Amino acid sequence: MIDSETSVSVALFQRMPEYLKALRGMRASGVSTVSSATLAKVVKLNPSVIKKDLSYASVETGKPRIGYSIDGLISGIEDFLGYNDPKDAIIVGVGKLGQALMGYKGFAEYGLNILAGFDVNPAIIGKVINGKNVLPLTALSAEIGKMKIKIAVLATPQDHAQQITDDLISAGIRAIWNFTPAHIAVPDTVALKNENMAASLAVLSNQLQEILRKENEL
Amino acid sequence: MIDSETSVSVALFQRMPEYLKALRGMRASGVSTVSSATLAKVVKLNPSVIKKDLSYASVETGKPRIGYSIDGLISGIEDFLGYNDPKDAIIVGVGKLGQALMGYKGFAEYGLNILAGFDVNPAIIGKVINGKNVLPLTALSAEIGKMKIKIAVLATPQDHAQQITDDLISAGIRAIWNFTPAHIAVPDTVALKNENMAASLAVLSNQLQEILRKENEL
DNA sequence: TAGATTGTTAATCGATTAACAATC
DNA sequence: TAGATTGTTAATCGATTAACAATC
């Protein structure tokens, strides 16, 4: 029995987009159904976890002997992840990384609708990137209130990250996606996700070392 | 007893950079020692996990009643994460995101030394970004061999990701940090880390929804 | 029908948390 | 000395894996 109180594991939300990527690839190559075993091989996971995830998210009901309909899975997962119900967001800090993020068309596919960028630099204020305006930071609070935006993408210099975070929160932002290397503090009432490049690199480096170590052992 | 065979948890490598960020912040504000309880509060973890991580990584030995030396922890963690032993890497695909990554000074702090960028676009080949040359993709294989590079940062368009991955691997690359939204396949002898924006966003969105849901319940 | 595959329950595994003796 | 905090062992918790009855 699945209880609505159960807070779902973070791991599930990390696996779902992986399934989606793999399934889109399969669809592109003309396949129409897939078994948990086949999908498991592609995403390098145990079939059981896939069966459980799909069943939990009530994404699609598979057929014994046949497997799951790929179309069904794709639209089910898109739904589950909220890709069909886009959320408005802003980008704060429109330097190199901020510009790359503003220009990134992938966000729309992930259900994130970037409305505007904010910066202090007069050279960039007023520009239009990927169809979105770059506004002055002084307009931040007013715009957040007016547009009722809940999500902010943080791409400022490291040393302004905390100050701007505080400003965002008092203006009503409830979720911060932190692309700066700064460690920022937020109250429990605000969601925070660090796009932690240092952590990713540490994991990758360690994996590489493990692989090389094992080879040398043989 | 800690066995050298034990493959260390991915979670540890994700927490270590968090500790480091928090500790640098503390040092900047003039503190010189910290207890596991205090650090735990900052990074929002259980003190036990911190004591275990630090003990496991033999990062620093704490003193009862006093705690750990912040300087000692910082240099110990930097060592553990290999920040003092930089690894050479290249960036493949120098579009908006690739340029942002080439310009990103943070990599050096994480022990990643970007040697060059590669692209097919004649308009960008020959440019120098953040002191690094952009070379033609045709030179990729020769350069990887010559410089003995093991790590590649992938920032190409999605539809070339797999092809270029295959090229990188045959040229000798052993670790790929994938910033494209493409699902790429690699053999077991190659380390792969997907910088999975879709997953991050899914986690953040879900957190936000949980927070808002709980508020509405009250 | 026979057999492949689902969905779910039970068993295992690993990671997190709690407890506590050692100690500065 | 008394007591705060470490390092580590034991207990708990949750997630992953295996097993298997149901079923198309």
Image (cartoon, coloured by chain):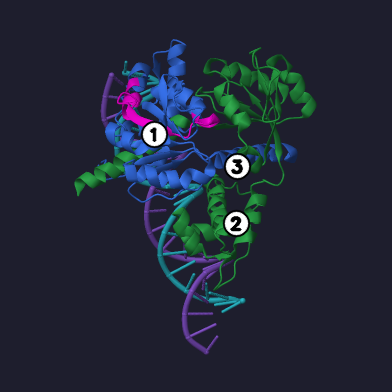
Chain colours: A blue, B green, C cyan, D purple
User: Residue B173, percent across and down?
Assistant: 69, 27
Circle 2 residue: B56
Place residue B86 in its image quadrant: top right
Say whether residue A153 is visible: yes
Q: Which of the two marks, 2 or 3, is nearer to us in this view?
A: 3
Say whether residue A49 is visible: no
User: Residue B153, percent across and down?
Assistant: 62, 28
What is the spatial separation of the Cα atoms under label 1 and label 2, in whole angstroms? 32 Å
Residue shown at the point (52%, 58%) measured from the top left:
B50
Q: Which of the two marks, 1 or 2, is nearer to us in this view?
A: 1
| Residue sitting nearer the eye, A3 or B125 | B125
Which quarter of the rendering shows the C terminus of chain A? top right
| Residue sitting nearer the eye, A154 or A106 | A154
Q: Which residues are magenta?
A: A75-98
Report in which chain the residue with disc 3 lies: A
User: Residue A55, percent across and down?
Assistant: 32, 32
Is A45 within the magenta?
A: no
